Amino acid sequence: FNIVDNWNHLGGLAGGLLAAAVIGVPQVAGRRLPRFHLARPMRAILAGALLLAAAAVVAGGVELPGPGRDLARGVNALAAGHPREAEPAIRRAAELQPDEPRIRYWLVWTYATAGDCQKAGVQLAELTRLLPDLPASDRQELDQLMKSCQSP
């Protein structure tokens, strides 16, 4: 399951604008430049500002809202062995995108590793409803997880 949301697309747009600001608009022989043309010093200032903004986002100085951020935060907490800390973030992501199977997948993991087998089972049923053709390897992995959750 990939963790991609619309902020990734906006980042690509910003990167494209940054590249265009640095490189500039090519002039075609016999055609005038577009109305929106920035002088080279302004392009450099704009490129610097966009680069600083991108660096702040990448460094974690600015958090972008959305289910992708919440899911990534929860999965990181789960990977660090803190399912109780992961649960609120992944649940928030599920509230923002209730029909997203990858979020349900991580909720199953979160609840099962926290020992809340009933909630894990509910999320597994929801995942199966949303993604009836769940790959066999993922299904086996989740079935094994549920068996270990129910074991004392």
Image (cartoon, rainbow, N blue to C red):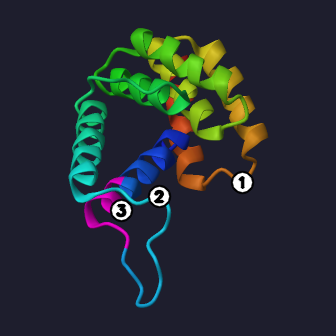
Give the residue pinned by disc 3: 20
Q: Residue at x 25, y 30 (%)?
A: 56
Residue interval drawn in magenta: 18-25
Q: Is residue 26 above or below residue 61?
A: below
Q: Is residue 35 above or below residue 14?
A: below
Q: Residue at x 49, y 24 (%)?
A: 65
Residue 68 is situated, as x and y percent measured from the top left of the image, at 50, 33
Left or right of 148 in this view: 73: left
**Front residue (pair 113, 58):** 58
Left or right of 18 in this view: 107: right
- At label 1, the amino acid type is Asp
Q: Residue at x 22, y 31 (%)?
A: 59
Q: Is residue 108 above or below residue 10?
A: above
- At label 3, the amino acid type is Ala
Question: Label 3 to label 2, Cα distance in Å?
Answer: 12 Å
Residue 29: numbered disc: none
Q: Earlier in the sequence, mark 3 or mark 1?
A: 3
Question: Of discs 3 and 1, which sits in the foreground?
Answer: 3
Give the residue pinned by disc 1: 133
User: Under tag 2, what secondary structure?
Assistant: loop
Q: Quadrant of residue 16?
A: bottom left
User: Under tag 3, what secondary structure?
Assistant: helix
